[in-house]
Image (cartoon, helix red, strand yellow):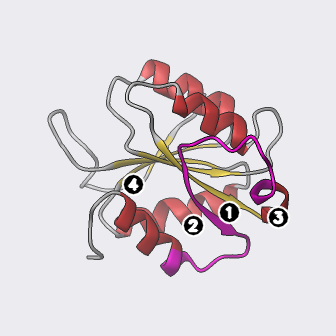
Amino acid sequence: MNAELAPSANAPTPGDERIRVLIVEDDPVVRRLLRLRLHKAGLAVLSVASGEEAVALTREDPQPIHLVITDGVMPGMDGFDVARYFARTEPPIRVVLVSGYLNHFVSRTDMPANITAFFGKPFSTNELVAKILDLVGMTAS
């Protein structure tokens, strides 16, 4: 597993109570763009390339994750699988799903309750960041 922490002197330190967001995205370009934009907005950002890496990260890292942003379609665990996993954590973690196949996900009847927002690809990073900041109770910096 190779979790990427957004580079910065502002990376979380022990006792830091900043909001931690986990990006689960198999496209490295999208993952990097999201990581940089969310970090710039003042969030502590972790990113991984698969649902399996997200599960491993949360089992290895005792620090809480406050919100997960996941791609809908990925090899192995898809976005719904990721959301189901984080629905079973204590406390359950909210999930934002992004996908180029949004209609496929929105029409499903087995919607995990912790999916709090959907964004279709391509999406405006400004709108996504604004929604995420709203979900975690922050304002744009």
In the image as oriented, which residue stretches furthest toward the top? Answer: 59
Q: Position of residue 106 (x, y in %)?
A: 75, 59
Q: Which residue is mark 3?
A: 103
Q: Nearer the N terminus, badge 2 or badge 4?
A: 4
Q: Quadrant of residue 7?
A: bottom left
CA gap between label 2 and label 1 equals: 6 Å
CA gap between label 1 and label 3 equals: 23 Å
CA gap between label 2 and label 3 equals: 24 Å
**Span highlighted in magenta in the image:** 105-127
For residue 33, which numbered disc appears in the image? 2
Q: Nearer the N terminus, badge 1 or badge 3?
A: 1
Q: Is residue 54 left or right of residue 26?
A: left
Up the image or down, 124 lies above or below 51; here it is below
Of circles 4 and 3, which is in front? 3
Of circles 2 and 3, which is in front? 3
Q: Is residue 63 left or right of residue 121?
A: left
Query: CB atoms at circles 2 and 1 under 8 Å apart?
Result: yes
At label 1, counting other C-alpha atoms closer than 10 Å, the crowd grade (few under 14, some 14-19, many 20 or more) is few
CA gap between label 4 and label 3 equals: 34 Å
Q: Amino acid at mark 1?
A: Val
Is residue 91 or residue 73 the one in the foreground? Answer: 91
Of circles 1 and 3, which is in front? 3
Q: Quadrant of the N terminus?
A: top right
Q: Which residue is mark 1?
A: 29
